[in-house]
Amino acid sequence: MSETQEMTFSDVAEHNSKKDLFIVVHDKVYDATAFVDEHPGGEEVLLDVGGQDATEAFEDVGHSDEARQILEGMEKAKLKRVPGDPEPHDDPSSSAASKADSSGTSPSGGDSSMGLAFYALVLLGGGLAFGAYKYLQAKSASESK
């Protein structure tokens, strides 16, 4: 790859067919054309993200080190972002990811508070069930006397 070569999202979007397929992963453009037929997940997986940012899809699968090496070999250019481009996916240097690391919550703010609410709900339900058990036990003991 030429170190100075850059492509925009609109350049990448033109390469979205089986015979000409580019994807973006972590702001790098990869020519996946030769790999379409060899992809272990099938060609549909690559065609679905062809001409787009595939970072989230790539990372969600949990690719092996070998897969990452193969990806490096397909690098074509660096992505040049212009106004109006979609936000980067899963970029560790982004401010949203930095906020998530420092606060322990996701940028959307819902994950940890949702877990805490669920925990509180389970405790409340357990307390109510225990109270009902004790009440019924006491009622049963008083009726048997």
Image (tube, helix red, strand yellow):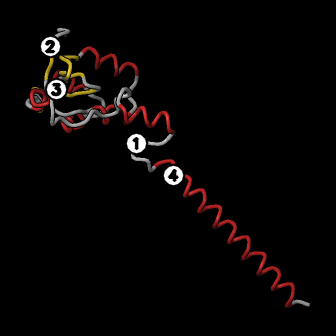
Q: Residues within 10 Å of mark 2 (few under 14, many from 20)?
A: few
Query: In the image, 48: left or right of 57?
Result: left
Q: Tell which circle, 3 or 2, labels the residue nearer the N-terminal end.
A: 2
Residue placed most toward the observer, 105 or 60: 105
Residue placed most toward the observer, 4 or 75: 4
Cα separation between marks 3 and 2: 14 Å
Q: Secondary structure at mark 3?
A: strand
Q: Circle 4 sits on which residue?
A: 113
Q: Judge depth for marks 2 and 1 and give the one in front.
A: 1
Badge 2 vs badge 1, beta-carbon distance below 8 Å = no
Which residue is found at the position 25% from the left and 34% from the top?
42
Q: Residues within 10 Å of mark 1 (few under 14, many from 20)?
A: some
The kind of residue on which mark 2 rests is Gln
Question: Which numbered tag is attached to residue 107?
Answer: 1
Q: Tell which circle, 2 or 1, labels the residue nearer the N-terminal end.
A: 2
Residue placed most toward the observer, 136 or 7: 7
The kind of residue on which mark 1 rests is Pro
Q: Residues within 10 Å of mark 3 (few under 14, many from 20)?
A: many
Cα separation between marks 3 and 1: 29 Å
Q: Tell which circle, 4 or 3, labels the residue nearer the N-terminal end.
A: 3
